[in-house]
Amino acid sequence: ERDVAWDRQHVGLTVATRAELEQWIQKLKTHNVEYQLIDDERIYFADPDGLVLELEIAEHVTRNLRAPEILAQWGEANR
């Protein structure tokens, strides 16, 4: 068993859905790859060379097209 520092620099990738993340977890378990689940939305694991990888569920954010206007108004009000 290797000692892996999960909090070191890593490569972060996203998956589209929770189901896809669950599929990755199952693959890791099948191949006896140690992983760490964080906040029930991302996993960290290391490749054979020790490179730490992160898989996270992609966050769907609704873009507010008025954001620049709202920020400008807030900036004016808080001068």
Image (spheres, rainbow, N blue to C red):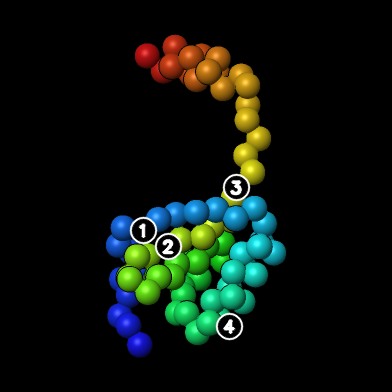
Which residue bears the numbered disc 3?
Answer: 59
Check disc 1: other Cα within 10 Å, few if <14, some if 14-19, many if 20+.
some
Which residue bears the numbered disc 2?
Answer: 53
- The amino acid type, in three-letter code, at marker 1 is His
Disc 3 versus disc 4: nearer the observer? 4
- Name the foreground residue: 64 vs 21: 21
- The amino acid type, in three-letter code, at marker 3 is Glu
Tally the marks.
Answer: 4
Mark 4 vs mark 1: which is more N-terminal?
1
Q: CA distance from mark 3 to mark 4?
A: 27 Å
Q: Are marks 1 and 3 in contact (CB under 8 Å)?
A: no
Taking 45 as reference, is 66 above or below it?
Answer: above
Which quadrant holds residue 24? bottom right
The residue at the point 50 percent across, 66 percent down is 43
The residue at the point 44 percent across, 12 percent down is 76
Mark 4 vs mark 2: which is more N-terminal?
4
